[in-house]
Amino acid sequence: MRNFDQEIEAKRNEFEEVKHQLSNTRNQFKAALIPFVQQQFKTEAEKVIKRNPELVKELGIEKLKELKDELAILSANAPDIINEFFDEEQLWWDLKENEHLYFCSGKYLPDHLNKALRLVIGKFGELFSKYDLIKIKPTGQNDYDVWIERDEYTRSHKHNGRPSYPNRLECTPDIINYVSEYKDYINNAKRIQSDINKIQREKESTAAIDLWDSL
């Protein structure tokens, strides 16, 4: 005689194992972001400095040294900054089941993860805005390069939005691969959930026909 409860329990154990794999992949993804973010801070600093020679000259040696020291601290804090924005449960299926697609287009992260990454890099803009080298508040003129969140639908700057990198970010292959791996695990988890539901329905149907036959 078929043991439906045993089958369901086996599938639930399989599901928990996949969730464990999802958690591991999520943590590997965040670990891969650390050197990427640190390099991004370094690259953006060089771009901003080169783009603003007059402002750099006005700041002077002491202020520039102060800024460079603060940038070093920011870079060292990259793991904590990544956790701040990437530990939100709505971003991850294993923390809270959602309808996000987790589809990477080339070198770009899915929109919901790209948004979080832009907020991470936004911490750089927040620092450099203190020295007037980056704008984090719209002024109404030439606001295309303002480092602030945009509305997902209108693409206009959010009122009281958080500092955010103004462009999409091209990620390294290992970062993209972790997201693709995460997506594959989600598909596997959903398949197991479907199997559990199917077995449950079969259990209920069998119980119904057994009751009918017993009368």
Image: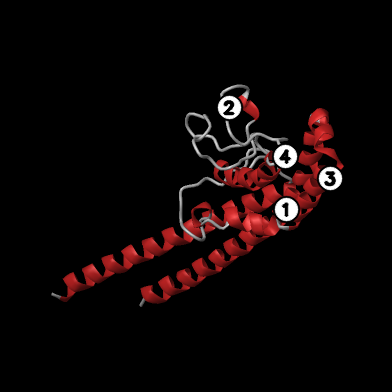
Label 1: element kind:
helix
Q: Are marks 2 and 4 in contact (CB under 8 Å)?
A: no
| Nearest to N terminus: mark 4 or mark 1 | 1
The residue under label 1 is 74
- Disc sitting over residue 104 in the figure: none
Label 3 to label 2, Cα distance in Å? 29 Å
Q: Is residue 80 left or right of residue 9?
A: right
Q: Report the mark closest to the observer, 4 or 1.
A: 4
- Disc sitting over residue 131 in the figure: 4
Q: Residues within 10 Å of mark 1 (few under 14, many from 20)?
A: some
Label 2: element kind:
loop
Residue 174's x, y, as percent? 73, 51
Amino acid of disc 4: Tyr
Residue 2's x, y, as percent? 37, 75
Relative depth, front residue between 50 and 188: 50
Label 3: element kind:
helix
Q: Report the mark closest to the observer, 3 or 2.
A: 3
Relative depth, front residue between 195 and 62: 62
Q: Are marks 2 and 1 in contact (CB under 8 Å)?
A: no
| Nearest to N terminus: mark 2 or mark 4 | 4
Q: Are marks 3 and 4 in contact (CB under 8 Å)?
A: no
Name the residue furthest left. 215
Label 3 to label 4, Cα distance in Å? 12 Å
The residue under label 2 is 139
Q: Residues within 10 Å of mark 2 (few under 14, many from 20)?
A: few
Q: Report the mark closest to the observer, 2 or 1.
A: 2
Q: Residue at x 83, y 47 (%)?
A: 65
| Nearest to N terminus: mark 3 or mark 2 | 3
